[in-house]
Amino acid sequence: MAESGKPPLTGIRVIDFSRVIAGPMCTQILADMGAEVIKIENPDGGDDTRKGAGPRIGGAVGTQEGESHFFIAYNRGKKSVALDFTKPEGQAIVHKLLAGADVLVENFRPGVLKKYGFDYPTLAARYPKLIYLSVSAYGQAGPLADRPGYDPVLQAESGMMSVNGEAEGEGLRHGIAIVDTMTAIHSTAAITTALYARRDTGKGQQIDLALYDTALVSLGNLGSYYLSSGENPKRAGNGHFASAPNNSFRTANGRIYIAAANQKLFTDTCKALGHPEWASDPRFAKLADRVRNKKELYALMDGVLMTDTKEHWAERLRHLPAGPIREMSEALDAPEVKRRGMLKTYRHGKVGDLRIIGSNYRFSDTPVDDSRPPPGLGEHTEAVLRELAGCSEAEIARLRAEGVIG
């Protein structure tokens, strides 16, 4: 039970078999919320993202030294155990950890863990209170269950990509791994809900979350557009097919986005731009008029906005839904990011100081703890085996010598 002043999931233990984004982002959120997350990693390199391309913290450019920016984004606050669970002795260690666990998270292809006795039916018989989250591309059963799946492919297959991009161009993937991210958030909600249900039923359960299903759910009103009309929604670039002004606009030093989606917001925007007469212009008087004549409206707005900077207009329009389109450096160095405490500096045992975006959860009575850095590979192996699996120093030394742990 949660206590005042402590993170809300204090006392919950999670065994994390997941890699890359969807699973690790989910377990990072659980760790921030106070759960003890034990990340099981392959001793030979660990999570796939530890070896990822791109910048590394504390390492020379072009080498595999230091820590991957990719890994540190999704693994804050966890305990890393480098353990080969394909070996019988490794499996025995996992069972010792499961004996005191509440949740298991995995994102292997369906059937992979069954080879080692870690599938849900097998574990449920032994640990009936275990909540078992399976993240897969297309679900645990069915004709597509054996297929691998990565975020951009799911964006393509779900119809998501078809509505993203310029009106006259091809459908584009979202730059962020949006399907993985949404699946992580839904995973967190599912696990916490299952913990709540277990309080009343006394039983655990398996949660089957498919990236494909999550992508479909995320279509929202655009999916409903097709289901209601039988027509495919059209790409609109930075604009909107059924709203205006809702677009990016040029200023003297970059672009600003304005989303004045209703009549009052449009009227107030016209006043702020110094042209209240636009609101009564027959071409723009109603939403349907503005959508039909958006080319003319946007030309007028660009003409005004080009006379000053995006910073000027952001301040002038601060009472309206409008803001500058920023580069990543501008966004993460913005004063409001610091005021909200969203950037954290961590002391990493291997590479020194590193900065990560922190948790966005704000609880008034049970605050989250996003103060713990991402772990080095196998950083907690000995402590976890000693304290939670009951292994002696001699056993740990033997397991390391036999390549069971790293």
Image (spheres, rainbow, N blue to C red):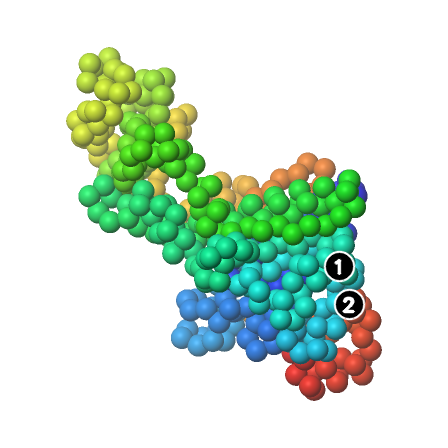
Does any portion of residue 332 appear in the rendered image? no
Residue at 34%, 18% in the rendered image: 263
Q: Does residue 294 appear to the left or right of 198 in the view shown?
A: left
Residue type indicated by callout 1: Ala
Q: Where is residue 33 in the image (x, y as percent from the top left)?
A: 67, 48
Q: Does residue 32 appear to the left or right of 309 in the view shown?
A: right
Quick one: 113 or 151, which is closer to the camera? 113
Residue type indicated by callout 2: Lys
Quick one: 340 or 18, which is closer to the camera? 18
Judge the density around disc 1: few (<14), some (14-19), many (≥20) Cα neighbours within 10 Å: few
Q: Position of residue 79 (x, y in %)?
A: 67, 64
Q: Where is residue 178 in the image (x, y as percent from the top left)?
A: 44, 49
Residue at 28%, 24% in the rendered image: 273
Of the two numbered discs 1 and 2 in the rendering, the one whose residue sits closer to the viewer? 1
Does any portion of residue 211 appear in the rendered image? yes
Above or below, 51 against 25 in this view is below
Quadrant for the N terminus in the image:
top right
Quadrant for the C terminus in the image:
bottom right
Quadrant of the rendered image containing residue 235: top left
| Element assignment for label 1 | helix
Q: Residue at label 2?
A: 96
Numbered label attached to residue 125: 1
Above or below, 220 against 188 in this view is above
